[in-house]
């Protein structure tokens, strides 16, 4: 024999669940509104620190391309180099990379300033100097590759067990090279 379900038995749990979802959504929206400004400030500070890491001896930066390319200037007002920010997808999410160039197009520094979604102990190691220092001295003139992909030309060794993350950083550096060549390379010649 089947038991009849009353409309009240369906309506009360449904409305309760709807009310709970509405309250949780409202709380998340308020939390997002409260923290959005602080998150933006932290991201801007992290980006600024990264720019200084890849372009030493710079006192300030002038924007060349909004949110992407910056010209580093020393205390005497002389151009020192460029800092270029690029973003690629790694194994777990976004990887943000700042690449520094001298005026001739040689890489003077690479800083992975955001890879929080990458695997701890593996992909996150792409932010270690032992990995990023491999890019120093390479030029914007040719593609850079991970040694597992190609062993000739400009290559770097991948972080062990983090090839996807290593390729993401390398792709970001290659994109920065392209941006440099399109926007600053003409000045350097």
Image (spheres, rainbow, N blue to C red):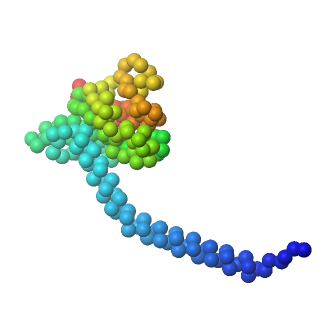
Q: How far across and down, in percent of the image, does residue 32 sit?
A: 42, 65
- From the viewer's perspective, tell me whether residue 143 is left or right of residue 9: left
Give the camera-side residue of 168 and 126. 126
> Outermost residue, bottom direction?
8
Residue 183 visible, this orientation: no
Residue 23 visible, this orientation: yes
Q: Could you say which quadrant of the image residue 103 lies in?
A: top left
Q: Is residue 40 above or below residue 54?
A: below
> Outermost residue, left direction?
76
Give the camera-side residue of 10 and 120. 120
Q: How far across and down, in percent of the image, does residue 155 sit?
A: 37, 24
- From the viewer's perspective, tell me whether residue 58 is left or right of residue 114: left
Q: How far across and down, in percent of the image, does residue 58 sit?
A: 17, 42
> Outermost residue, right direction?
1
Q: How far across and down, in percent of the image, does residue 163 sit?
A: 45, 32
Give the camera-side residue of 121 and 76. 121
Q: Quadrant of the N terminus?
A: bottom right
């Amino acid at each position: 024999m089947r038991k009849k379900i009353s409309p009240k038995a369906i309506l009360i749990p449904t409305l309760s669940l709807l009310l709970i979802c509405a309250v949780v959504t409202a709380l998340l929206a308020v939390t997002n509104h409260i923290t959005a400004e602080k998150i933006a400030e932290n991201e801007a500070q992290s980006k600024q620190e990264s720019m200084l890491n890849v372009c030493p001896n710079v006192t300030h930066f002038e924007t060349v391309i909004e949110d992407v390319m910056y010209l580093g200037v020393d205390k005497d007002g002389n151009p020192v180099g460029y800092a270029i920010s690029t973003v690629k997808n790694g194994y777990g999410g976004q990887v943000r990379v700042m690449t520094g160039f001298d005026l001739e197009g040689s890489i003077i520094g690479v800083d992975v300033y955001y890879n929080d979604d990458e695997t701890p102990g593996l992909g996150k190691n792409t932010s270690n100097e032992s990995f990023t220092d491999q890019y120093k001295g390479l030029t914007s003139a040719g593609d850079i590759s991970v040694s597992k992909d190609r062993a000739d030309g400009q290559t770097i060794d991948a972080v062990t067990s983090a090839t996807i993350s290593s390729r993401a950083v390398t792709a970001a550096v290659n994109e920065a090279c392209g941006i440099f060549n399109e926007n600053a390379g003409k000045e350097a010649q």
